[in-house]
Image (spheres, rainbow, N blue to C red):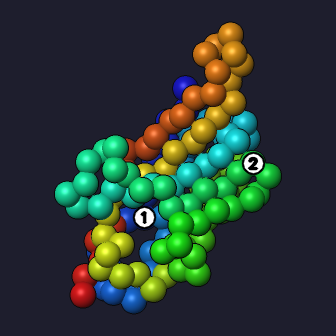
Amino acid sequence: QVHLVESGGGLVQAGGSLNLSCAASGTISNAYNLVWYRQSPGKQREERELFASIAATGVVNYADFAKGRFTISRVDSAYMLYLRMKSLEVEDTAVYYCEAEMWRAPYLGGPVSYWGQGTQVTVSS
């Protein structure tokens, strides 16, 4: 079991920056993918939007809206996932979640995902 805790959210003006962190309670070196999602106001849990991911190989992927503005990184030795956000827009207002997709032996049930509780990001105009 790995617990994830996001931090760094808050209120920022449009055009500003925020740095989010996701701290894991244990090793994430076997996380084949670490992901940032966000849930915008009025959206349901199943409508969470995947916008940034980083594989164990270091390969990163971004949703179009995140390209050039958001940067995902991971430091496995510190059990940390990060998200740097700049040029924030009002539309970026959401609860931001991290997810760890981890290898697990088939006899234990196969791959498993862990989620944090989220951190609120509010961008004012």
* Mark 1 nearby-residue class (10 Å; few <14, some 14–19, many ≥20): some
Residue 2 place in picture, x, y as percent: 55, 32
Kindly indicate the quadrant of the structure image that contains residue 121. Answer: bottom left
Name the kind of residue labelled 2 in the image: Ala
- 72 or 63, nearer to the observer: 63
Which percent across, then down, holds residue 89? 36, 82
- Mark 2 lies on a secondary structure that is loop
Q: Quadrant of the N terminus?
A: top right
Drawn side of residue 101 relative to residue 122, left or right = right
Please name the residue shown 74% across and 59% down the image. 59
Res. 77 visible in picture: no
Direction top: furthest residue? 107
Answer yes or no: do the residues labelled 1 and 2 have beta carbons within 8 Å?
Answer: no
- Residue 56: which disc? 2
Taking the spot 79% from the left edge, 52% from the top edge, the residue there is: 57
- Residue 71 position within the rendered picture, expressed as x and y whole percent measured from the top left: 60, 71
Residue in view at x 56 percent, y 61 percent:
52
Residue position for label 1: 8
Q: Residue furthest right?
A: 57
Q: Between marks 1 and 2, how big is the CA–CA gap? A: 23 Å
Amino acid of disc 1? Gly
Q: Is residue 38 above or below residue 23?
A: below
Rendered location of residue 3, percent (x, y): 50, 36
- Residue pushed farthest left? 42
User: For residue 46, which numbered disc appears in the image?
Assistant: none
Regarding residue 89, the answer to whether it shows in the image is: yes
Image point (53%, 80%), residue name: 69
Residue 125: quarter of image: bottom left
Choose the circle earlier in sequence order: 1 or 2: 1
